[in-house]
Image (cartoon, rainbow, N blue to C red):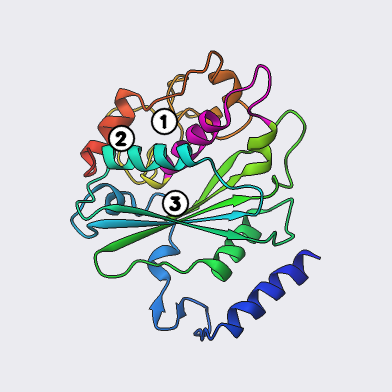
Amino acid sequence: MKLNSLLALGLIFAMLGCSKDDDGTIVNGIDRTPNLQATGSSAHDFLSDSRYRSLVIEVFYVDGFRPQTQTLTNLKNFMQARLHKPDGITIIETQIASPGLAPYDINEVAQLESAIRTKYNAGNILTMYLFFADGGTATDTASQFILGSAYRNTSFVMYETNIHNSSGGVGQPSRVGLETTVILHELGHLLGLVNLGSPMQTPHEDGAHPKHCTNENCLMFWEAGGSGILGMMIGGNLPQLDADCLADLQANGGR
């Protein structure tokens, strides 16, 4: 069923008049290669305006799993506060039908991106892709589950079913609070935190959980991307970047 869904998406993509080279990195004359790199490798491009002066964010969501409007506002506000993009930051939302891939593995997420993403880096415009999925991951359990994953230099996914199940109820964080925290955590990885493309100014990478911060109150603490975040948000507090993470961003071209 999953294979058929991906094949159908590929067929639709072809019917829309897209022609690709043999490895799929060039479509309709657009080179996708700059957006197919390792997570964190475009940190300086996000943070500074030395190459890209504006940012366009494509947000795709499955019908019934649209992110909260305030969540996207919080994302844009965070970026405006931390990135140098003098020509502006634009968010484009697109609803899609369920691709029938739940539970997702990251390879399927990447293949879906290839089928539906339309914006790629061009000129002085940097682009980012964000997908709100109608499911969790194949590795989720009742007590341990993933809420979001950054998997390329300009791409990450939110497992919105897990977000819905973990927010808005008695004793749970608000939907906006949880979405915002997970989105900003995954964005932090695209910005090169921790030691993933923005060099550390002071050692603060967690040896037991690489690419995460040692400060258990920091937005980049390892639990902020999964079920452990619920404990961090007791009382309604939203984790923030600590001084070490902010110093890393500023040293790599950010605010």
Taking the spot 31% from the left edge, 26% from the top edge, the residue there is: 244
Q: Residue 172's spot in the image, x, y percent? A: 64, 21
Q: Position of residue 26 (x, y in %)?
A: 44, 79
Residue at horizontal 68%, vertical 42%? 161
* Marks 3 and 1 close (CB-CB < 8 Å): no
Q: Residues within 10 Å of mark 1 (few under 14, many from 20)?
A: many
First in residue order: circle 2 vs circle 1: 2
User: What residue type is disc 1 on?
Assistant: Glu
Quadrant in which residue 33 is drawn: bottom left
Say if 16 sits above or below 1 in the image. Answer: below
Above or below, 7 relative to 163? below
Q: Nearer the viewer, residue 55 or 26?
A: 55
In this rendering, would 69 be left or right of 109? left
In the picture of the structure, the residue carrying the numbered disc 1 is 205
Q: CB under 8 Å between callouts 2 and 1? A: yes
**In the image, which is nearer the foreground, mark 2 or mark 3?**
3
Residue at the spot 66% in from the left edge and 36% down from the top edge = 164
| Residue 143 sits in quarter | top right
